[in-house]
Image (cartoon, rainbow, N blue to C red):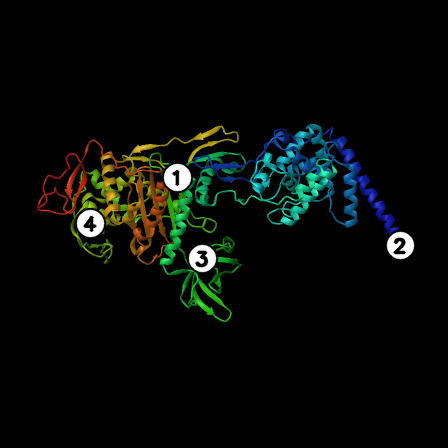
């Protein structure tokens, strides 16, 4: 008897709730005639958040910035089968109901009451649209009534096709995709018109639970859901049984590329994003900007690959063995390895070194969440267990690097990378790291001397030098890299051999303040002090700023201001901003030409002979700082200024005599070889300006050749009035 009373009470309760909800909808329908719905005014001028796209110099998409990854499209461009797939699973009576489906609401209420919790919503497509646009996701009767009222009002103000178009552009479909167009590209790499029936059904199955039915995360559940959609399409007579069966048999083929940017462009894109942020603030994430940049994606990929390979080589030179190579000998205490992470835990990482399982604690300063399987890390063996085949290592710091490439004719940045792992190291060393350029600064001292009327054959004394440091009892006693003295040398010889002592003597002659003034004309704005250590590149400057200072050497003395963005357009591709290259004559054409030939000598006869492999006229300068903390090579061809820096973030010694020639130059050569081969550039000797004469001189002495000197003879560039008159003795 008690049992029957409970059943009777339950039925009464159900009826009361149904009546209450129905009365609420009915009254609300009437009330809606007398009250405005301000939310719906936004729908009249529907402008969803759209994706900002960043393109390279050839208009190839390289990255997307968004709050919601969406590509709005008109209903007419959405295939009928895709529409039918959504209607069959989400709202088969969409074109019949007034915004709410009373039978579905009643059915959902019974299911919810029997389960004792909110399980089903019974929402139509119009109700779902009202919810995602105007309401929260809370599951309450009050929210449900408001959703229904909004749906009814939406139906009064818009046609069914307009509502369906809103919905198919607004609905979230997982993996960051909002709307069917974005989802089609993310999951299948296709336009909507290219989707198969099976792919359309899979997309239609996602709104119910985008994460649960995500084909990347849960392919089996996704396929089961797809098949359910196909079954519904058949029952609604949208498709034939043969079509259903064929679609169910179709293999799931997903687009492998899911990132919102090409990985190699990460540092460049972040640099551009910061510029956009200054201009547009957060609106850049929702305004659908089309940003056309200067990037050469092929060169960028070469740069990224060469830097990674170069850093791995440098780490091996430091004594870190490649763990992936098979070894006959067992590891021993003190051995150093570079290996790939196989598992990341909160406090340690795991990897494989030969037959051993590697364990390494993560330093406190490193966020474990930024580490991923596949990342290469360095470690030193501190403990070994041969029985359990476990090896324990201490974390070691890797060498890092940066590469920048400019088009000297315009200042356009063609490539940029600020490290080897953007996910771990957001710090962009190309534009943020302040490093000493070392010997790579010497061309600025030499260029300053040339601009003052010195000739390339000017004699300098490469001999010991000692200077007391003002205010202390200490002395500054610089030496050459070779720790030798070369006596009288020409300015050319001093630059080619990168002689420290001879360059200091030159700076004494021209005065540090004049050298600083010359550097300013080249675009270096960092702090510089008028000390003799300036000759050895003792300033701190970013690679971006320093490498761009070589632009006038590559041109006829013209400095082209670096830039990354060519133009910005709106979502309809109407130009909003356009960058006009900016130029100024930094140095005379005569000085620029002389510097070309002097820096070419560094390649043919000096510290950068490895670059002779390049079948172009290339010139440049190596740079090494005290105790091998920094290594540089900055060089150029007529159409590209390219610079490489490597070093440690901690500013510690890299070890193994890591000079510009051994550490940075090989990376530069690898990049330039690929670039020149791709461009098909030929070796062309620069044309001398009218005021410059090419004169044969004795290479060693700098004087005119004579029978008394049987040494090497070269063509040297002299500005009118500075050419030698004396013969070699």
Q: Nearer the viewer, residue 726 or 127?
A: 726
Q: Nearer the viewer, mark 2 or mark 3?
A: 3
Q: Residues within 10 Å of mark 3 (few under 14, many from 20)?
A: some
Closer to us: 11 or 717: 717
Q: Secondary structure at mark 3?
A: strand
Q: Earlier in the sequence, mark 4 or mark 2?
A: 2
Mark 2 vs mark 3, CA separation in Å: 70 Å
Secondary structure beneath label 2: helix
Residue 2's disc is 2
Rendering coords of residue 15 (x, y %): 83, 42
- On the image, the x and y values in percent for residue 715 come to 18, 40
* Camera-side residue of 30 and 390: 390
- Seen in the image, is 394 located left or right of residue 3? left
Nearest to viewer (mark 3 / mark 4):
3
Q: Position of residue 429 (x, y in %)?
A: 40, 47
Q: Nearer the viewer, mark 4 or mark 2?
A: 4
Residue carrying label 1: 414
Pointers 2 and 3 in contact (C-beta within 8 Å): no
Residue at numbered disc 3: 377
Question: Can you identify the residue that label 4 sits on?
Answer: 502
Hey, which residue is sitting farthest right in the picture? 1
Instruction: Kindly identify the residue that appears in the image at 56 percent across and 43 percent down.
Output: 255
Q: Is residue 537 visible?
A: no
């Amino acid at each position: 008897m008690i049992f029957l009373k409970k059943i009777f009470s339950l039925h009464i309760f159900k009826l009361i709730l149904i009546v209450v909800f129905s009365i609420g909808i009915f009254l609300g329908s009437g009330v809606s005639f007398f009250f405005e719905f301000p939310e719906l005014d936004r729908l009249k001028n529907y402008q969803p958040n759209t994706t900002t796209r960043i393109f390279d110099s050839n208009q190839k998409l390289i990255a997307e910035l968004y709050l919601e990854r969406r590509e709005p499209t008109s209903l007419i461009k959405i295939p009928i089968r895709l529409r039918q797939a959504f209607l069959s699973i989400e709202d088969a009576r969409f074109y019949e109901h007034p915004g709410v489906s009373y039978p579905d609401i009643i059915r959902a209420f019974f299911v919810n009451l029997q389960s004792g919790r909110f399980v089903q919503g019974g929402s139509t497509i119009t109700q779902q649209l009202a919810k995602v646009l105007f309401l929260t996701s809370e599951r309450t009767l009050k929210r449900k009534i408001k959703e229904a009222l909004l749906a009814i009002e939406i139906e009064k103000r818009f046609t069914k096709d307009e509502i369906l178009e809103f919905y198919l552009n607004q609905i979230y479909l997982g993996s960051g995709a909002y709307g069917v167009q974005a989802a089609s590209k993310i999951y299948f790499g296709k336009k909507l018109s290219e989707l198969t029936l099976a792919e359309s059904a899979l997309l239609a199955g996602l709104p119910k639970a985008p994460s649960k039915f995500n084909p990347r995360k849960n392919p089996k559940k996704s396929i089961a859901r797809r098949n359910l959609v196909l079954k519904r399409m058949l029952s609604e007579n949208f498709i034939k049984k043969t079509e259903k069966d064929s679609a169910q048999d179709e293999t799931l083929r997903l687009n492998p590329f899911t990132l919102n940017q090409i990985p190699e462009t990460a540092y460049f894109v972040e640099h551009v994003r910061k510029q956009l942020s200054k201009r547009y603030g957060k609106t850049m994430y929702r305004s659908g900007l089309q940003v056309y940049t200067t990037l050469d994606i092929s060169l960028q990929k070469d740069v990224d690959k060469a830097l990674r390979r170069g850093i791995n080589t440098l780490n091996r030179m430091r004594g870190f063995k490649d763990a992936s190579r098979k070894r006959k000998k067992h590891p021993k205490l003190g051995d150093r390895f570079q290996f790939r992470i196989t598992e990341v835990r909160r406090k340690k990482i795991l990897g494989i070194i030969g037959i051993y399982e590697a364990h390494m604690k993560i330093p406190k300063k490193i966020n474990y969440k930024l580490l991923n399987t596949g990342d290469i890390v360095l470690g030193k063996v501190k403990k070994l267990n041969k029985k359990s085949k476990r090896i324990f290592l201490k974390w070691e710091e890797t060498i890092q690097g940066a590469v920048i490439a400019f088009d000297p004719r315009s200042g356009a940045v063609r490539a940029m990378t600020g490290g080897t792992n953007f996910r771990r190291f957001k710090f962009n060393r190309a534009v943020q790291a302040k490093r000493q350029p070392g010997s790579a600064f010497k061309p600025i001292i030499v260029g300053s001397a040339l601009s003052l009327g010195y000739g390339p054959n000017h004699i300098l004394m490469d001999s010991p030098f000692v200077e007391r440091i003002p205010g202390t009892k200490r002395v500054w006693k610089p030496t050459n890299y070779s720790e030798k003295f070369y006596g009288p040398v020409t300015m050319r010889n001093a630059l080619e051999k990168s002689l420290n002592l001879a360059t200091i003597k030159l700076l004494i002659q021209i005065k540090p303040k004049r050298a600083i003034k010359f550097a300013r004309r080249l675009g270096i704005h960092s702090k510089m002090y008028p000390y003799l250590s300036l000759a050895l590149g003792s300033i701190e400057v970013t690679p971006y700023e320093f490498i761009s200072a070589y632009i006038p050497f590559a041109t006829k003395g013209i400095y082209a201001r670096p830039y990354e963005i060519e133009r910005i357009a709106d979502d309809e591709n109407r130009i909003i901003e356009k960058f006009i290259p900016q130029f100024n004559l930094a140095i005379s054409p005569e000085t620029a030409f002389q510097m070309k030939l002097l820096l070419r000598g560094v390649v043919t006869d000096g510290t950068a002979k490895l670059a002779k492999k390049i079948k172009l006229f290339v010139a440049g300068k190596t740079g090494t700082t005290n105790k091998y903390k920094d290594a540089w090579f900055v060089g150029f061809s007529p159409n590209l200024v390219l610079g490489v820096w490597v070093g440690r973030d901690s500013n510690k010694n890299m070890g193994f005599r890591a000079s510009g020639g051994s550490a940075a130059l090989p990376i530069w050569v690898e990049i330039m070889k690929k670039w020149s081969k791709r461009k098909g550039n030929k070796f062309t000797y620069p044309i001398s300006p009218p005021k410059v004469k090419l004169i044969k001189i004795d290479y060693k002495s700098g004087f005119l050749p004579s029978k008394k000197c049987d040494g090497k003879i070269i063509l040297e560039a002299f500005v009118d009035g500075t050419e030698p008159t004396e013969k070699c003795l």
